[in-house]
Image (cartoon, rainbow, N blue to C red):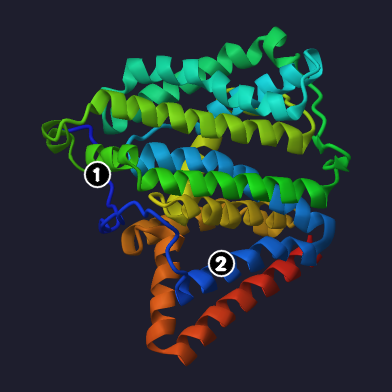
Amino acid sequence: MSADVAVRRPAAEPLPARPRALRRLTPGHVVALLGLLALAALPAAFGDFGFFVGQYVMVYAMVGLSVVVVTGYAGLISLMPYSFAGVGAMVTGAAMASWGWPFWLAAPLAAVATVPVSVIVGAASVRLRGLYLAIATLTAADFLGETFFRWDAATGGETGWTVTRPALGPIDLSGDPAFYLLTLVAAGLLVWMVEGLRTSRLGRAMYAVRDNEIEAQALGINVFKTKLVALVIGGMLAGLGGAFLAALLVTSAPSPFWSPVVQATSILFVTLVAIGGIDRALGAFFGALVVVVQQQIFGGAEFFFAFVGIYAALLLIVLLRFRPGGLVQIGRMQWQLIQRRPAVGTAVAVGVIAVNVGLAWLFVGLS
């Protein structure tokens, strides 16, 4: 029996030609932009709690982008995104607390620090496929959890390093609203970069390797190099997300990155990106929105929190079975409905948004 895991993917869409100039905005682009701006402004309606949840969503989206590149683009099943985030968090903490570096230098270092780990893990396991690759990366995550993340000199001991939130010249970004804006801008830039990667020459090579390695080799694509580059880019994205995670929590305690917690959290990131849309950059954002809001809102309601895992699992199964493109695919279908039947489509969209916002208000009050 083959150990490869067959994953049903959404129907492949032709990648647009790389534009030489900015294209004219269509009504769909305008509506999508307005919708994203409305979601970005939504935390303000919930006060400090809303900004706190918004920060978590953006940080989770940054780490989730690594899954988009590694799994969505290159077709590799890696269960190490949170391990790379942990490396980024530890390096950020050490650079700021021990070396006195500002956050603006520590964050790029956090991304670069994941490169040696990505290369070592990739060189040892990238020739594997499917379940074998998943097991190899799971083992590597366990190794890091029991060695690097228990090394006091690197982690600052069980209490970790103390991290201060950054400032931009005279502008203090330590408050929740200001830091939320910072994470929003950072996540937006990373989404733009990852979406640009999708239509680049390297992104097309990743898609070719994902769909058929033999045909990709026949086209002159170096399969090994392409997979390794995908793992390196994914590790750097997760490491940068780890830097923002350390700044969000104002500490870089190592315990969340010990085994088996780190493996379970990495699986959570793969799940949330699959829910959002695993082959599109915005999928990481939508998946993080669903999962983080559930965790934070239901976390204070003991009766409902027990059902969060069950709900997430059922949602993942239903989406993989009927909408493998995740929430991104559902959003595209909803826009098509609005174009065909404006009254019905708009009413459905407004109704879904109103129900979700209303439930959020209700459960915030209960918790």
Kindly indicate the quadrant of the structure image that contains residue 318: bottom left
Mark 2: secondary structure:
helix
| Residue ID at (48%, 69%) | 29
| Residue ID at (71%, 7%) | 153
In the image, residue 44 above or below residue 283: below
Mark identifier at residue 6: 1
Marks 1 and 2, Cα distance to the nearest angstrom? 35 Å
| Residue ID at (56%, 67%) | 33
Q: Of the residues tagged 1 and 2, which is closer to the observer?
A: 2
Q: Is residue 229 left or right of residue 6?
A: right
Q: Position of residue 70 (x, y in %)?
A: 39, 36
| Residue 365 can be seen in this image | yes
Relative depth, front residue between 222 and 92: 222
Q: Position of residue 61 (x, y in %)?
A: 57, 46
Relative depth, front residue between 36 and 326: 36
Q: Position of residue 306 (x, y in %)?
A: 63, 53
Q: Is residue 227 left or right of residue 120?
A: left
Q: Are marks 1 and 2 in contact (CB under 8 Å)?
A: no
| Residue 80 can be seen in this image | no
Mark 1: secondary structure:
loop
Sequence-wise first label, 1 or 2: 1
Q: Is residue 78 left or right of residue 2?
A: right
Quarter holding the C terminus?
Answer: bottom right
Q: Position of residue 292 (x, y in %)?
A: 63, 51
Q: Which residue corresponds to mark 2?
A: 33
Q: Amino acid at mark 1?
A: Ala
